[in-house]
Amino acid sequence: MKLPAMLNGLWAYRGFILGSVKREFQAKYRNSLLGAAWTVLNPLAMIVVYTVIFSNVMGSRLPGNPGGFAYSIYLCAGILTWGLFAEITSRGQTVFLENANLIKKLSFPRMCLPVIVVLNALVNFAIVFGLFTLFLAVTGNFPGTIYLALLPVLLVQILFAVGLGMVLGVLNVFFRDVGQFFSILLQFWFWFTPIVYVATALPAGIQDLMAYNPLAALAGAYHAILVHAEMPDWRSLLPVTLLGLGSCVLGMRMFRKRSGEMVDEL
């Protein structure tokens, strides 16, 4: 299926996509006493915990930045955006397996499923990051118009996550070990990305290896914008941008070539 035909198919099934996103969001809090209020309470609790524990109890300070909330902002900026990446890739790798019955019984563009995964992740991210932005404004740490630079950085991260998630999703249908392996890899990847610590705290040899970690450049961009109120080093994002484009093309080619066999495997 060519790209224009695929986009037309997605548009024709936009009602199915939006309905699925809405149902999944509602199902998450069905039968709970506070319902959708948990979408606010959970991220709010996380931000409060990071702020109180690290800034006030542990007295953690960011090297070169004496601000009382600097380390909390550094931590939240990294963890929240990592959460978006982890949710898209983790759910992307299992999206075809989880919807096996739907794929076998109904005729619809299969690409709707990855789109639903991404939209659900973006809804969750918008809520938690909106609260974080409110926290920045209330504490006087909002970076100003530099904040808008987050949009292209987020776009690059989503592009990379979608491409990687599609590749993993197709592979996981034929080789179930892929999903198990990626879950372990994701844990190592988190700690190999400067989210909890600053990159300069690492030995020189390890810092050199960071250049091969695409998420380290993204984390650096988020920290530059949200912690230092500076424009990110756009050139450092070029490798991850190319990697994202490449993985999207690869994922689409794999999906188009193997979509028929996937139904048999499921």
Image: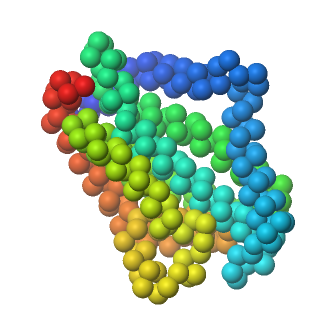
**Image coordinates for residue 86, horizontal then vertical, percent:** 48, 49
Q: Residue, x 27% and y 55% (percent of image)?
A: 246
Q: Residue, x 52% and y 39% (percent of image)?
A: 121
**Which of the 4 image quarters holds residue 243?**
bottom left
**Image coordinates for residue 87, horizontal then vertical, percent:** 49, 43
**Which of the 4 image quarters holds residue 231?**
bottom right
**230 in relation to 104, above or below:** below
**241 in relation to 126, above or below:** below
Residue 151 appears in the picture as rendered: no
**Image coordinates for residue 193, horizontal then vertical, percent:** 50, 66
What is the quadrant of the N terminus in the image?
Answer: top left
Quick one: which residue is furthest to the bottom in this view?
204
In this rendering, position of residue 36 left or right of residue 8 = right
In this rendering, position of residue 239 left or right of residue 174 = right
150 or 58: nearer the viewer: 58
Q: Residue, x 74% and y 52% (percent of image)?
A: 47
In this rendering, position of residue 51 left or right of residue 179 = right
**Image coordinates for residue 227, horizontal then vertical, percent:** 68, 68
Q: Residue, x 17% and y 24% (percent of image)?
A: 264
Residue 68 appears in the picture as rendered: yes
